[in-house]
Amino acid sequence: MNDFDRVHAYLADLQDRICKAIEGADGAARFKEDLWSRPEGGGGRTRILRDGAVFEQAGIGFSDVSGTKLPPTATAARPELAGASWRAVGVSLVFHPRNPHLPTTHANVRHFRAQRDGETVAWWFGGGFDLTPFYPVDEDVLHWHRTAQALCAPFGEDRYDAHKRWCDEYFFLKHRGETRGVGGLFFDDLNQDFERDFAYQRAVGDGFLDAYLPIVERRRDTPYGERERDFQLYRRGRYVEFNLVWDRGTLFGLQSGGRTESILMSLPPLVRWEYGFIPEAGSAEARLQEYLRPRDWLGELAS
């Protein structure tokens, strides 16, 4: 089995394992699978869970796609890719819980390889995971970042700090002046040592459930009312704004001829916008703003 096939096998299995775990956590709904192929090359399987006891919508996609030409946005930043054929494999997920006290979450792990005349001209790993609460709980944020730090530890003492900072910078809504949530890990263009970099990708992929499932168990049954639900739908609008305005993965997928339904599965099933909304001073809704900026969560919350 060559290196790309090893990554392919790991990611396909990761999708299976996460689906099984989320179905168990939800307890009511199951994922439905949509198999698709891409005329330019490759395909994938998109799985959607809807109207569950815990998750209003949970989407997780596996794709292995290829092509002979990259979009201009990709070759402008990486001129060595001009004229190269390419292949990309990855797993991406976004889970939108029903309960406003249970955060939305996103994770992605991917591998890219480009060739020209049979020779590899570029390869890299990318990915990460992040958390978007509407009613943040310090215990949850601390657990999320402790899990991220622990999985980063075998890869160097600076790995967590660097990829946590990268996450804060990437998932930042510039037009709103706020982070999308409380962050996590983000990395791209990791291409120093294949075995070590692949091991890190596996650590991130495997660590997602360790980070998220305990939060699901703690918050899934927290009481809420119409006010909390309205605020959740309003804040979901920020999620849509980021994915459609700033997210490079969404842009690359659409510009490279990707499957639109699978690319946009990250969008929430229900959302609302309200002009000039300002939460009441001192309210639980106003408290969220203190969490929408880069912070040293482990230092501040553990003290």
Image: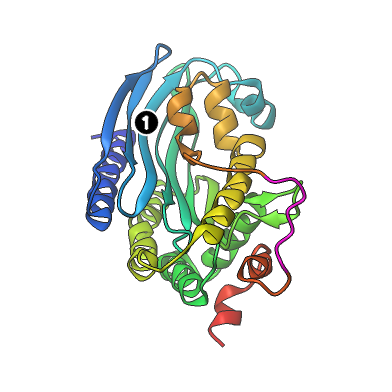
Residue 172 part of the magenta-drawn span:
no
Return the residue nearer the eye: 57 or 155: 57
Name the residue beneath numbered marker 1.
Answer: 63
Disc 1 marks which amino acid?
Ser
**Quarter of the rendering occupied by the C terminus:** bottom right
Q: Position of residue 273 (x, y in %)?
A: 65, 43
Image point (56%, 60%), residue name: 227
**Quarter of the rendering occupied by the N terminus:** top left
Q: Residue furthest top?
A: 39
Q: Could you tell me if residue 62 is visible in this image?
A: yes
Q: Position of residue 96 (x, y in %)?
A: 44, 49
**Element on which disc 1 rests:** strand
Over which residues does the magenta segment extend? 274-280
Image point (70%, 56%), residue name: 178
> In the displayed structure, does residue 256 sit left or right of residue 276?
left
What is the chief secondary structure element of the magenta stretch? loop
Q: Could you tell me if residue 132 is visible in this image?
A: no
Quadrant position of residue 2: top left
> In the displayed structure, does residue 172 sit left or right of residue 224?
right
Q: Residue furthest bottom?
A: 303
Q: Residue furthest front?
A: 226
Residue 279 part of the magenta-drawn span:
yes
Image point (48%, 24%), residue name: 260
Number of residues whose C-alpha sits closer than 10 Å to that of mark 1, classed few (under 14), some (14–19) or many (20 or more): many
Return the residue nearer the eye: 22 or 268: 268
> In the displayed structure, does residue 259 sit left or right of residue 181?
left
